[in-house]
Amino acid sequence: MINGKLYLLGGGWTTLTVAGFPAQHRCALAAAFAVPWTETSRAHAVELEVVTEDGQTLATVNGRFEVGRPPGILPGQPQRLQFAAEMVLAFEAPGVFVVIARANGEERRRVQFNVAPAAPGPKPGS
């Protein structure tokens, strides 16, 4: 993040193709939360969790934040909080995985992605 702006390169993918298993993948999770006017200037907890199809946790990112009301803001206008966290995910097998976003312990969003093996390439000399 630079000056409160979140820049993404290669974001939004839904399938991760790996050479084989087990596999490790360095990546970053990015999230944006709209904080209602009535919830500004108060502490909040946020959590991003990456889980397997059967609910096993691969990684968790926890944090706390407080968003204020800048001068000149219109009454009732929500504020946006954005953040990103780097991690290394370990995949033992192909499958469907889910990123769960929670604010103050309440689930806000689920985003699914797949991990698949790369298709075998041609054999040398063929």
Image: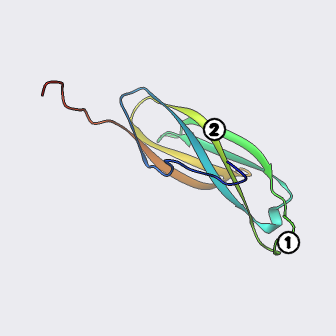
Along the horizontal axis of the image, is 20 left or right of 29? left
The kind of residue tagged 1 is Gly
Residue at x 57% of width, y 36% of height? 57
- Say which of 111 and 86 sits in front: 86
Q: Which residue is mark 2?
A: 60
Along the horizontal axis of the image, is 36 left or right of 57? right
Find residue 7 and report its horizontal and vertical position in percent.
60, 51
Camera-near label (2 vs 1) is 1
Along the horizontal axis of the image, is 120 left or right of 68? left
Find residue 111 and report its horizontal and vertical position in percent.
52, 52
**72 versus 88 height, above or below:** below
Q: Residues within 10 Å of mark 1 (few under 14, many from 20)?
A: few
Helix, strand or loop at label 2? It is strand
**99 versus 59 height, above or below:** below
Whole-angstrom CA distance, mark 2 to mark 1, is 36 Å
- Say which of 106 and 82 sits in front: 82
Find residue 110 and report its horizontal and vertical position in percent.
55, 53
Residue at x 71% of width, y 50% of height? 105
Residue at x 84% of width, y 64% of height? 70
Q: Which residue is mark 1?
A: 72
The kind of residue tagged 2 is Thr
